[in-house]
Image (tube, helix red, strand yellow):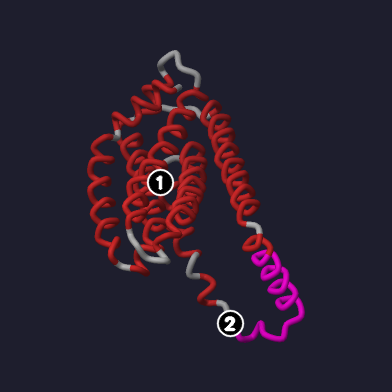
Amino acid sequence: MIRLAICDLSLQRRSLLAEIPVLALVAVFFMSMTRGASGMPMVLIIVGSWAYALRAAYEDDKSDMWVFLRALPIPPAHIVGARFVSTALVVLLFAVLVSCPLAFVNSPEARSWPWLMGIGIALGLAITGLFQMVYFRFGYRAASSWFRYVFFAFFIPALVPWARLKGNPLAERMAARLVAALTWLAAHPAAAAALAAALILLLYLSAWSYSSRTFARKELT
């Protein structure tokens, strides 16, 4: 499986070589900007990871890669596992690439780059893991359409009439519990980081397991 993951990265080297300079230039550009430096690593890791996963799926679909690999004496679980391993390595690569320069920025906000890098890695793994799960089950078109729906879902809170929720007992109880949970997490950063890492790892491994089962049962023509 490790060899397959290395081969997968080799096949996607053009995509990587196209993304890496862009991410590096944007990261360097925002190094001198206090506000940009504090939030940009997370955004770049997420966008770069998603672009890589989408591009890899497109290339697979265009070249009928899965039909070829399934014809070889390779367990389907290894084929799926290689893609999950290679994607995780790319997420980590992008995280190091865009976050390390911020370690040299001498500003209070930029000093939070380790936490922002961790958040970026977590969200990058979550998004790519869910994408791979849909991709191996329903194909490239369904997975790419799924992302559009998720993207527009981020704008749904802007459409909610939040002013009308003020004074609502249920809304106030939910808001109080949310504030209490956030306060506890802020007071226990180590526990919060461990909990987040465990949840993301569980999500990624669950997506990996589901993708392996569905891909093994999938009929390719």
Q: Which residues are magenta?
A: 162-183
Label 1 sits on residue:
141
- Give the image location of residue 42, x and y in percent: 42, 56
User: In the picture provided, is 117 more to the left or to the right than 162?
Assistant: left
Membership of 174 in magenta stretch:
yes
- Give the image location of residue 198, x and y in percent: 62, 44
Q: Amino acid at mark 2?
A: Pro
**Element under disc 1:** helix
- Give the image location of residue 4, x and y in percent: 39, 23
Membership of 136 in magenta stretch:
no
Q: Quarter holding the C terminus?
A: top left
Foreground: 5 or 121? 121
Residue 9 marker: none
Give me the C-alpha separation between circle 1 and circle 2. 34 Å
Please tell me which residue is depicted at 60% across the width and 38% down the height of the picture.
Answer: 206
| Marks 1 and 2 close (CB-CB < 8 Å) | no
Residue farthest along the top direction in this orientation:
73
Q: Amino acid at mark 1?
A: Arg
Q: Earlier in the sequence, mark 1 or mark 2?
A: 1
Foreground: 44 or 149? 44
Classed neighbour count for the residue bearing mark 2: other residues with Cα under 10 Å, few (<14), some (14–19), many (≥20): few
**Element under disc 2:** loop
Please tell me which residue is depicted at 51% across the width and 49% down the height of the picture.
Answer: 122
Classify residue 96 by image quadrant: top left
Label 2 sits on residue:
161
